[in-house]
Image (tube, rainbow, N blue to C red):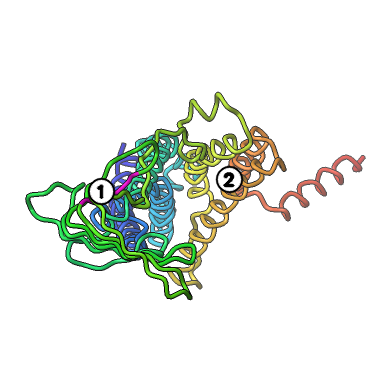
Amino acid sequence: MLFQSSIRRELARSFGATFVVLMTIVLTIVLIRTLGQASRGVISPQDVVLFMGYAALGRLPTLLTLSLFIAMVSTLTRMYRDSEMVVWFTSGRSLSSFLAPMFRFAWPVLLIIFLTALFVWPWTNRQTKSMQESFGNRSDIDRIAPGQFQESSNGNRVFFIDRDAKTDQKSSNNVFISANERGKSAITSARSGRIEATADKQVLILTDGQRLESETGKPNLKISDFEEYGSNTGGTVPLNSDATDAKLLAVPVLMNAPTRANLSELAWRLGLALAAVNFVVLAVALATVNPRGGRSGNLVFVVLTFLAYNNLVNLGQSWVYSGTISFEGLLLLLHGGILLLGLFWLGKRNNNWTLRAALRKRAAGVSYRRSP
């Protein structure tokens, strides 16, 4: 009881501190990237906090896995360095007996990784894609603020509106439009305008105005007055269309339509959960201490191991997509192979298996059979 409780307490402290540090770093990077997208007009500035939240949820499996791996390796390394492992070994504990308290501590984290990788990840992708599409499909009138000149989305027109507080968001006063399209220049001004949806387009209906048209390179000028005039705003009415991106699809949809794209996405999501389980075994197998090396030497090795495994998971996704390997073959060879390698290394350290001892044992057996 003391053996398991002491390990779990130290694991909890190390895991919490590591997760907070990693989450802070990731949120800082995501904030800089999101602010850059907002400044370029990719996303709405009002949705920056929501985008950060969705990005954090999408990266949660990777952050939890890395935090768990670092916490376990650092805890066991500290026990080796302070000779606590020697005490446990002399009291009858083996290295393999550390797997039980590790998994007892890690199973809630592994469950969260499994749920977020399989279910939360596609949900966050759908939310961010919906917000980007709704912001990108807004009309040219919605892109500008009242009292300011601004170009349209394609750069061929310049708008100016004067929207009163009494009017709604789809009607404006004192509208000015300067357009240059297909070799013709036109300047349109009107007392008021309103937006109407027709078919799959949004049309700006101008009332009580004047329009000046001229052709590039020609002195002709056409002036016309109108009571009502329609102009395309450059926006479309959002349509309900089925998402074809595999990142947006739920797990049942991926399983019911086993295309290469869907299977590669499913292999990646399952790979995150299986990798988290394998990292628990690898933490026990790889944790050690080198008196001649610094304290950060083992941490660097842990990070490199995590990056190598994580890159293999990403490469496996592309292999399944290209047909290089099957879905079942990737799960068996990559994750099953890593698990067997971790168990073998754990058994080697637990039983002190060495190549020299194996050769001596084999030589002794051969000499015994030859003796009369």
| Three-letter amino acid code at the position of disc 1 | Glu
In x, y percent, where is residue 78? Answer: 39, 59
Q: Secondary structure at mark 2?
A: helix
Residue 228 tag number:
1
Q: Measure the alpha-carbon separation of dots 2 and 1.
A: 76 Å
Q: Secondary structure at mark 1?
A: strand
Asked whether, in this view, residue 132 is left or right of residue 281, the answer is: left
Residue 200, image quadrant: top left
The residue shown at (33%, 51%) is: 231
Question: Residue 205 lies in magenta, yes or no?
Answer: yes
Q: Is residue 112 in view from this perspective?
A: yes
Question: Residue sitting at 17 percent across and 60 percent down?
Answer: 174
Q: Residues within 10 Å of mark 2 (few under 14, many from 20)?
A: many
Quick check: 288 left or right of 174? right
Q: Which residue is rendered at x = 25% and y = 60% of the image?
A: 210
Image side of residue 342 versus residue 181, left or right = right
Residue 134 is a magenta residue: no
Residue 269 position (above or below residue 13): above
Earlier-in-chain disc, 2 versus 1: 1
Q: Position of residue 247 (x, y in %)?
A: 48, 41
The residue nearer to you, when weighing 259 against 276, is 259
Q: Nearer the viewer, mark 2 or mark 1?
A: 1
Could you say which is closer to the camera, residue 289 or residue 244? Answer: 244
Which residue type carries mark 2? Gly
Which residue is denoted by mark 2 in the rendering?
A: 342
Give the quarter of the image for residue 129. Answer: top left
The answer to whether one can see residue 11 in this image is: no
Residues shaded magenta:
202-207
Q: Residues within 10 Å of mark 1 (few under 14, many from 20)?
A: some
Which residue lies most toward the left here?
166
